[in-house]
Image: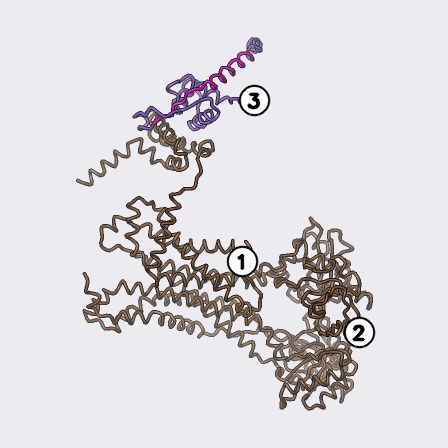
Amino acid sequence: MRNNQRMKSESSIRRDPETIVMRTWSVRLLRQLCPASLYEEIEGDLIQRYKRDVSKTSERVARRRLAWNAIRFIRPGILMRNQWSLNITSLSMVRNYLTIALRIMGRNKGYTTINVIGLALGMTGALLLGLWVANEFSYDQFHEDGDRIAIVWNREKQGGDVSCWSATPRVLAPTLEAGFSSIENAVSYAHYSDSYLFVAGEKRILKNEANFVDPAFLTMLSFPMIQGDVRTALNDPNSIVLTESFAKQLFGDQNALGGEITVAQGDYKIPFTVKGILKDLPGNTDFHFEFLLPFSFIETNFGKEENWENNSVVTLVKLKNGATVQAVTDQIRDLKKKNVQGEKTELFLYPLEQGHLYSKFENGVPSGGRIEIVRMIGMLAVILVLIACINFINLSTARASRRTKEVAVRKVTGAFRSALVFQFLCESILVASLASLISLGAAYILLPGFNSLIAQSLSMNFTSASFWLPFAIAVLVVGLLAGGYPSIYLSSLSPIRIFRGGRIELSRSRIRSLLVIMQFGFALTLIVSTVVVFMQTRFLQQRNVGYNRSNLIYQYVTGTLQKDFVTYREALLSTGYVSSITRTSSPVTQRMSNTSGMYWRDKDPADNTIIERFSVDQHLAETMGVEIIQGRDLDLMKYPSDSTGALINEAAARLMKFDNPVGELIEDSGREWHVVGVVKDFVFTSPYRRVEPIVMQGAKMGEHMEGVVHIRLNKDQPVRDAVGAIGQVATKINPDYPFEYNFVDQEYARKFANEATTIAITSIFSGLAILIGCLGLLGLSSYLIETRMKEIGIRKVLGGSVSNIIGLLANSSLRPIFWAIVIFSPGAWWAMRWWLQSYEYRIDFSWWIIPMASLLLLAMAMSTVILQIYKAAGVSPTKTLKSE
Amino acid sequence: MTREFLGEFEELVLTMVAALREDAYGAAIADEIQTRLSREVNLSAVHVTLYRLEDKGYVKSSLGGATQERGGRRKRIFTVTSAGMATLKAMRAARVDLWKLVPQLKLIVGH
């Protein structure tokens, strides 16, 4: 009966043309957009029109015309008649929302704390990572003409692969500048390792590397010059440009510009005049130097280097406006081939601005590079925030029943659903803003520590819009992300059902479980990656290096040590602190040079394998502690012919396919070396890679090639005494130079700086992820237990034991985590295997890593909730069942 | 002195306002144009033109005349101001003057 009536009234509503007009979507839209003063007559006209159309044609046609007529009223001639004004009502509503939000937050302090702290932790982590990512993207982006500057690269087919590198001949830059109209400037930039003694007045500073450039380097790149003229500073062969802090080291507070410096290298002592002071280089550049010397100095004193086969410098070019990298690449591609008989190397340009992030080439084509790690870190930042957002989402939807009455009252008193959505979004944005304030403070406090951890100098630029704008947007996005789903969900509740009383079905627990699964899945992945990164790095650090790093120091051969080396060596050996001395071309931790141009008996002409060169005078095995497995060590005292002797490592012996390597001849750049022994492979270049073939050539290379002395300290004497004694001898023989030395084990440890950073980042942030996840779990489970108190009471009354109830609650709390482990393990396994692939020398992915990480995760989660569960299970049923 | 010129459609609407007197409101004007000139006009175009003429001071308006026909919504009744009437007359006079210059046109074409 009642139903019938309802249907009747509904159909009569349907037939009323006025209602039809008012309910038409385009009319509703027009109502929103049309100025109120005009709307009445327009709606009247539309109704009148519609009635006429209905009587003349069919209702269907009339409706279509109505919709169309209304749409056509949405035109500038109508819209522009709106009096735009700030809507005071909605502003005061926002104030109301914020007041309510603050009250609710104040009433549920525990829950608010979990939300705000969780978000703040996530945002702090993301902020720090974001600063790092932003810094990575800013590398060498500050050069004014950066879009026109490129670096010349080589590409050559070697064996089956195409390899790329950026070292070029010195003669390339002048050739490019003179011969190609689309190139404005081309400069060489060289980084030479050698020891240079700087003397300014009484001050002496030893530097182990020097940078030579062409004068146009200073105008091409935008390193600001504080004093001097960038256009002329390096024009004179005896001019030098210093950075501000190096100038300060040399000259103290005196004015450095115009100052005289003597630079001693080997037997030379050359005066230079300071013609420019550069501001210290920013952290975000891949150029590293403390002083610049002009190439013209080398050229006026030692002649021009015209050799196209000696790749020793980086060549930078600045293109003319309008020239493209591709077009110029096409022009210069065969330049090397034209100048060298039989050369196979092609040249190409690669933009400077992409150099930092995208300079990895695989098989001749760009294939990422540092950008990969930057992306991973960026993802980590997003995941952290996501995990924190999930807490907010879960807690607000779980606790929705607390706010049903408020939603209902607002709806009954006339709130649109959109207003409710807006209200809840205001709340989440408020929480996000609070969290962001905390995170700003926390990040500010933590930044110095983070910087030293990752060996960077990041800073938060509080005065710059490029910091605030992304930050504000991020806060807004976090607010929307966290509040979006809860607001839609809460605003959907129907007031009738709420007021009718009884239990409102708030079963969204499946989505909540899914989100918890995601959180803990991410956490699991992070734990696994931390463990794997840690193990791999340990593995690399403990790799058998093949020589004895401890009690071994090296120093550069400076000043008169060159001339008086024999005296020096004998004096050292007679101190009793030193057991063995070997001169080499470079520290054993650094490569010096390599070549694919060595020849030996029966060498396959197609073999382009690169072989490392290392010059050694004698006693390599004794000083370094490498093991001779065939033949003998070099020893000039016993065998003077050892000056043309050579040691090779196992890898080289394998490569050269010698059955009996001793006595074989190896030719390199027109010199022949006879092999006297084979040493066991030792790590010479990178501890991440397989050992490359090395040929250790004897003293015939000349003393100037052997600029480093390795000194094996007598292990029975204290290191400090030994170093002191060596220093005394050195300064006596070589009084002009300060005594400087390095410990080989420390230098070796520096090869792991990157890994140390990765470990620090992954472990800290996986810890953060777990912490945030557990915070959320704490909030969620405490609420769920609260809602189940009666159930627990009834179970106990009916004979359920405490342990039973604990099992039940633990099961429901921890089940999502169990699923997270099941679902995310394969992904974690796959990701870490992918990461390990980047190391030639790596651990196997042990089977127990994932179970161990899972156990750890479960244990963390368990310890988070167990106290609550235990308490809840212990509550007497008389307390919980008293009411109702 | 700059004189405001009326577009063709504006002139038409203004003339209709003058012709319909107390019954000059949006829908009625559109209907009249449709029936008398067999010209399909868009309701919103008539409204926008009326508002524009009001801005220019050629018509003024007042609300009134709610009828059942339009669901009780009031009409906006437009009346021509003296400035509007003067413009209309001036335009008509100019039209007539111009027309005098082309008396033979029809004959020649007809031949």
Three-letter code for the amino acid on which mark 2 is drawn? Tyr
**Chain identity of mark 2:** A
Mark 2 = which residue? A268
Give the numbered dot on residue A462. 1
Q: Which image quarter is the N terminus of chain B in?
A: top right
Say what secondary structure mark 1 lies in: loop
Label 3 marks which chain's residue?
Answer: B
Q: Nearer the viewer, mark 2 or mark 3?
A: 3
SS of the residue under disc 2:
strand
| Magenta stretch contains residue A721 | no
The kind of residue on which mark 1 rests is Phe
In screen coordinates, is B62 left or right of A654?
left
Chain B on-screen colour: purple
Does A691 sit above or below residue A212? Answer: below
The residue wearing badge 3 is B2
Q: What separation in Å lies between label 3 and label 1 (alpha carbons)?
A: 57 Å
Query: Callout 3, which amino acid?
Result: Thr
Colour-to-chain, brown: A
Query: In the rendered structure, which segment of residues is drawn in magenta?
Result: B74-97
Name the foreground residue: A479 vs A593. Answer: A479
Q: Secondary structure at mark 3?
A: loop
Instruction: Tell me the chain of label 1.
Output: A
Where, quadrant-wise, is the C terminus of chain B in this rendering? top right
Residue B30: x %, y % from top left: 41, 23
Residue A330, image x, y percentages:
70, 54
The CA span between labels 2 and 1 is 50 Å
Magenta stretch containing residue B81, yes or no? yes
Q: Where is residue A564 shown, x and y percent of the image? A: 78, 83
Question: For mark 1, does the 10 Å Cα neighbourhood hold few (<14), some (14 to 19), or many (20 or more) residues?
Answer: few
How far apart in space, not on screen, are marks 2 and 3 (Cα)?
Answer: 91 Å
Q: Residue at x 23, y 73 (%)?
A: A801
